[in-house]
Image (cartoon, rainbow, N blue to C red):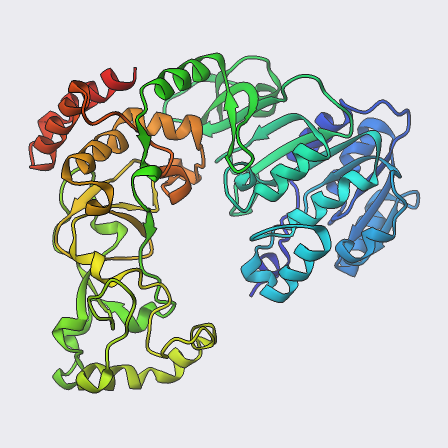
Amino acid sequence: MDRRKRFGVHYTPSALARFVAERTAGQLSAARPMVLDPACGDGELLEAIRDLTNARLVGYELDPEVAALAQQRLGPDADIRTGDFTELGGRLEPAGFDAIITNPPYVRTQVLGGPHAARLAAKFGLKGRIDLTHPFVAMAPRLLKPGGVLGLLCSNRFLTTRAGANIRALLTEHLDVVELFDLGDTKLFEAAVLPAVVIAARRPQGRAARFASAYQVPGRGEPGDLFAALGNPRSSTVSVGARTFAVEVGTLARDAAEQPWRLSTPERERRAVRVAARTWKTVGELAKIRVGIKTTADQVFIGEHWDGLPEHRVPEADLLRPLLTHEDLRPWTTPGPPRARVLYPYLDLPHRQPVDLGRYPRAAAYLAEHRERLEGRRYLTEAGREWFEIWVPQRPSLWRAPKIVFPDISPEPRFAIDRSGAVVNGDCYWISVPEMGGDDLAHLVLGVANSSFGTRFYDDVCGNRLYAGRRRWITQYVGRLPVPDPATPAARRVVAAVRRVAGGDAGHVVEVERAVARVFE
């Protein structure tokens, strides 16, 4: 595992550091503020804010060599300390800093390790999945003076994910957000995560926080500076080199605590009121949205190689089932025959029950060849499962019924109804049509989800986009898609048009778009 992944090391580029420092300094009133960076790296952020405010600097850095570089860069007046701030920060006097400016390491639970993550969660009162950003933010309110300011550069995932609820709660309960910038797919530094900047103060604001976002779009805008556009009061489209960004400016909307934070504009709010008035139920209220199977040993269970094996090593046909992956899915139309097959060692029952390998000698022989690897998945056997099972099989009998299937990650919606009985892979999600309430409702959901209205609703309400315009179509977002009353004539027109498109007549997509628009707009 390389150092960047293990320790979350992604040093802040100079232009981005100056932007964070400028927005932080703009909220300071002290003539010579005391500023802390609890994960200072080579000192880029501390240097940027010192240049603007003549601040007194304190920094912490885990790596002694990097700490020495930061000390040399910032000079003898800076106090750069070596050590783990999550352990040492508790020794600092409360309310000792006018500002905290930081780009904390982004290390997820999977890399931290379960025991370490559990210790941090208990120590800082955190819930669910955490990354190292969470404890750094948790310490900020205690260390800031009244009126003090936090300038935070972090992954924008906290805005929309369930795991990000920790940070959203901390920023809501203990600080007041002044400004928020979702830097989207701007690729301002090398980290795989998309960045965000939060400016929050330990004082009441009395007004909604300003929220600006930037995402790449096709076409050309006026040549300009992205950071200047983010600071402007109005939305704009700006071209920087060969790339063009839509910069949208509004205010921060915070709905229920578990819901994503979102950018609010008057037009977005008007749309939300219209949609809410025309919504019968949400997709999540109609049926359970399930992720596909997760084997945790795909090379053993999944592939296109089965026919190339010697006959005595090919598992029995009724255990080799077609497997739908994201590559098989297109919007509207039934997926074709999947290319991959999965060794699925379960009986077709409503509950999970592994097969008796004694009745499947070829499958038993094949799995025995990989037994050492499969038994290495200790979490599976510790959960009381058989060594040859897959980690997330879902409910075996439901695969046979019709189901809506869609990919986890895709620039555009790709919802389709599968009637083949195929198993769904973990890079997709699925909804059982019988559980939902039948075929008409499934086609109604298909119409909304695949429409341009559905995509705009997603961007307005969920907004979790990745690089290259890709979106995450996961449970918590798809579950919020609105569904109109299926008994209304407008909804029946959507169903009729979707059935024609799903039957292969692509010319009726325009009809679907118009019918969905009439329902909600």
Is residue 18 shown above or below 118?
above
Which quadrant of the structure image shows residue 515?
top left
Coordinates of residue 408 in the picture (x, y in percent): 34, 47
From the top left corner, tell me how far across and down residue 207 is, in percent. Answer: 66, 17
Percent position of residue 354, x then y: 28, 74
Apparent side of residue 394 relative to residue 264 in the rendered image (left or right): left
Residue placed most toward the observer, 495 or 148:
495
Q: Is residue 216 left or right of residue 206?
A: left
Residue 296 occupies quadrant: bottom left
Q: Dividing the image into 4 quarters, which one contains the N terminus?
A: bottom right
> In the shown orientation, is residue 449 left or right of residue 213?
left
- Is residue 440 at all visible to an observer of this figure? yes
For the point 15% across and 27% down, the residue is 509
Residue at horizontal 38 percent and vertical 30 percent from the top = 458
Q: Is residue 355 left or right of residue 65?
A: left
Q: Tell me what residue is drawn at x 44 percent, y 17 percent.
A: 268
Corner quadrant of residue 416: top left
The vertical placement of 482 against 140, above or below, is: above
Residue 224 appearing in the image: no
Q: Quadrant of the C terminus?
A: top left
**355 shown above or below 213:** below
Question: Is 210 drawn above or below residue 289 in the view shown?
Answer: above
- Image coordinates for residue 462, horizontal then vertical, percent: 44, 33
Which residue occupies the foreground of this view, 85 or 174? 174
